[in-house]
Image: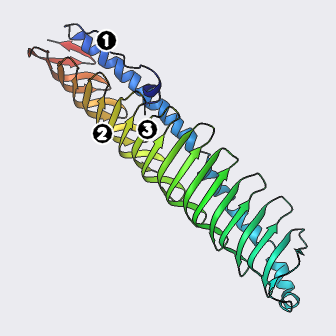
Amino acid sequence: MGANCATQHCCDQQEIGNDVQLLELQSANEDGKAQAIIAARETEVAAATDGELASYVASVRDDTCSHFDKELPELEENKEQLSSELDGQRPPFTFKTGSTYDGQWQGSMRHGFGVQGWLDGTSYEGQWVCNRAEGKGRFQHSDGDQYIGEWVGNMAHGNGLYSHRCLTTYQGQWVQDLQQGHGVESWNDAGSKYMGVFVAGQKDGFGEYEWPDKAKYAGTWRGNSINGHGTYVGNDGRCLRGQWHDSVIHGLGMYCWQDGRTYCGTYLFDKKDGFGIFRWSDGRTYKGYWREGRQHGHGMLKSADGEVKNAYWKDGQRYG
């Protein structure tokens, strides 16, 4: 989706003569480089999504819940004794597991504000309701990850901020321990950022992605990948707008260069394929059919002064 498009002059303006073969050569050149552009950006998106925050949060989900459940058997075992004590703030309590709780109680249940610490370095500081994290609180993982936000039933639910090893952060809406709704995911080391909709922990819906070089994509996502209608704009101003499939242009699309050149037509997995119109900034136009990024089939070449040539192309070569 334009990594090289945003970082190098992959389609430099060339001095084009009157020979129609220059069209063929340039079109093939631009398609090959466009493919590299899209592939590079696709790799960046994959690297930024796969194995990052979404998958990590899912992996620690069960672990978080298990921490809150570890002391329940002991609390049930000592229910009668604990219930005889006054409700509210009590002295710190040490469990048989070695974990500690310092906070408010209601009978035999942690209830109110309290701090629970486990031997592995994990801790929760916040509100409790009947032995469950409920309300606002901070959960500190033993590996340094941290969630600060709203809780329901021992799960992140509502608005919250998750920091993943000081590398990645997500701030936004949560539903049952998964990113759900609107949120902002940032990669601190690379400077990339996604702002948009999440569904079940994945980018899904409308979203905007910005790369470190300030190139941007705004459009539809499905399953953590660019799918649907969207627009990519490189940091040099070139623009690729149209339909996307798995992070490559696929379907109807329009590519605009800063020097005024444009292509408008159909793409098949990042290559011009089907009917399309290519225009130069000097007024010349090619209208016709393409296959795998090259002219293939009937086409018309119109010069800047209005002269029209109809011909047949095969794999980028003109006949007639």
Q: Position of residue 92 (x, y in %)?
A: 88, 75
Q: Is residue 173 visible?
A: yes
Residue located 31% across and 15% down the image = 26
Lateral position of residue 315 relative to residue 159, left or right: left
* Lower position in the chain sequence, tag 3 or tag 2: 3
* Marked residue nearer the N-terminal end (2 or 1): 1
Q: Can you see residue 223? A: no
Residue 216 numbered mark, or none: 3
Left or right: residue 223 versus residue 102 is left
The residue singled out by tag 2 in the image is 251
Q: How many marks?
A: 3
Which residue is drawn at the image coordinates 18% and 12% (left, top)?
319
Residue in the foreground of this view, choosing between 159 and 263 = 159
Which residue is disc 1 drawn over?
14
Label 2: state its secondary structure: strand
Helix, strand or loop at mark 1: loop
Which-is-in-front pick, marks 2 and 1? Answer: 1
| Extreme residue toward the front, this view | 89
In the displayed structure, 232 sits above or below 82; it is: above
Closest to the observer, 21 or 238: 238
Foreground of the two, 309 or 93: 93
Q: Are marks 1 and 3 in contact (CB under 8 Å)?
A: no
Q: Amino acid at mark 1?
A: Gln
Image position of 304 with respect to 217: above or below: above
- Colour approach in the figure: rainbow
Amino acid type assigned to the residue bearing label 2 in the image: Gly
Q: Quadrant of residue 38?
A: top left
**Residue 104 position in % (x across, y down):** 79, 80
Residue 167, picture quadrant? top right
| Position of residue 118 measured from the top left corner of the image (x, y, whole percent) | 83, 64
